[in-house]
Image: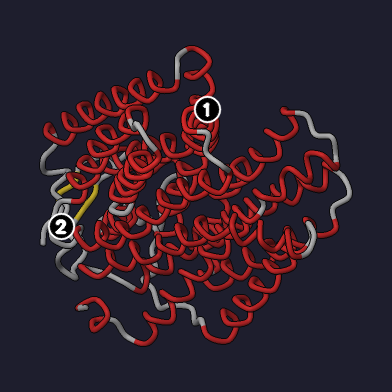
Amino acid sequence: MSFMRQISRAQWIGLVLVIGILFIDMLLYSLFIPVVPYFTTEYAMSSTTLGILFGSYAAALFITTPFFGRVADKLGRRKTILTGLVFMMISTMLFVFSQTTAMLITARFLQGLAAAASWTAAMALLADLFSGPVRGAAMGFAMTGISSGSLLGAPIGGWLFEIGDHHTPFWFAAALTAVISIIVVFALREPVREERQAEGGGTFSLLRHRTILFVASIILLAETTLTMLEPLLPVYVTEQFQMSPLALGMLFGVMTLSYGMIAPIAGTLTAKHNPFRLMLIGLVGLALTLPLIAFAGNVTLLMMAGCLVGAAVGFTLSPTLPTLGAIVDGDSSGGDYGVAYALFNMIHAAGMMLGPIAGGVLTDALPVSSSLIVISVIIVSAVFGLSLLKRRHKQTFSISMSGVEPAQTMKANGKSVYNN
């Protein structure tokens, strides 16, 4: 594979460590799910309390990401990654020793804080290490860490819970975190990067650029749709197909697996094709495949529909990561990768918070099948609007990542021209 032959030893080490960090973070995120019924019974949690427990991760991610974006740019990627791993260890230990609901919520909040530090710095590290046509592929491979952790977390957590107790999954996560922390300390070196003299505001100031606003809209649409399905699908497919918990887990597993498999492919395509067009193609695919879940007549068709939905989300999101890096490369105002990927995290967190709420509101008013069609119509409408924006400002969206030289300029008024 050409990508494998093009990268150096330092790039290999950085990529493998980033995949490992993202994998462990998402593993811990989903490892928690099989233990939730135990905590709900043990602490007599209400639905509201349970919602707060789940929402605290996204809230922490959203609130603390801008801070860690700046920290990653000023203090370096390595220190910020290690900070995230320390908080990850603390949150895991809190899960082990928690005796109250408040401690559980605190642990989940710290887990989100850890993700804000490690995700932002890890993505910025990849942008430092990789440029030109290989950056998209590297970002795509990094996303396999996210999907693999999400895919394996719940099954591993459930198995460890069964062979041990509710502490066992978190002891396992703590051990993995300790191992990756030690490897980071001894193997990861701070990359040499260009000093940038930043001007203006922080993370949200990036949204003044049309290209950044476009990418942020794509991320929000895809993440909101994906997280909307998490509370919506289990009830629907259980009623329609009398699916067992194992079969339900397989459905989400298939979605996550297809997401992870398509991400490197979509990332690689950004080197040859306009990434904004790829994002729109992914959204169109998502709009077309989402209603297939409602029309699936049996479990096999449902699994196939879930596979297509997961692949569509992966195809949509994977180009956003290298595109943010390319935009920063061409930003004459002196932006940096930490702030750019902090924005990715914030929009990701906003989607995590908005999705379940929007899904609940829709399904309270409409049947699930109708809700899925409504979501598809909203996505198609958004694609139409974003396509018009792209068409009206062709030069702004004519970004190229096929060369190693950074794109030329991006002025504060949102207009930019990217050349090979």
Give whichever of 414, 164 is nearer the camera.
164
Left or right? Give the position of 10 relative to 53: left
CB-based contact (under 8 Å), mark 2 and mark 1: no
Q: Quadrant of the C terminus?
A: bottom left
Q: Is residue 160 left or right of residue 126?
A: right
Q: Residue at x 87, y 45 (%)?
A: 100
- Give the class, few, some or many, for how many residues have Cα within 10 Å of label 1's Cα (few <14, many ≥20): few
Q: In 3D space, how far apart are the residues under numbered discs 2 and 1 (Cα atoms)?
A: 48 Å
Element type where label 2 sits in the image: loop
Quarter residue 209 falls in: top left
Q: Earlier in the sequence, mark 2 or mark 1?
A: 1
Answer yes or no: is residue 82 visible. Answer: yes
In the rendering, which numbered label is found on residue 239?
Answer: 1
- Give the side of residue 14 with respect to residue 399, left or right: right
Relative height, residue 80 to residue 281 (above, below): below
Give amino acid for label 1: Glu
Look at 55% across and 62% down and name the residue there.
118
Residue 11 sits in quarter:
bottom left
Q: Position of residue 276 (x, y in %)?
A: 21, 45
Q: Quadrant of residue 296?
A: top left
Q: Amino acid at mark 2?
A: Ser
Q: Secondary structure at mark 1?
A: helix
The residue that appears at 54% across and 73% down in the rendered structure is 78
Where is residue 324 shown, x and y percent of the image?
Answer: 32, 53
The quarter of the rendered structure image containing the N terminus is bottom left
According to the picture, the residue beneath numbered tag 2 turns out to be 400
Q: Residues within 10 Å of mark 2 (few under 14, many from 20)?
A: many
**Outermost residue toward the right in this view:** 99
In this view, the residue in front, 384 or 309, is: 309
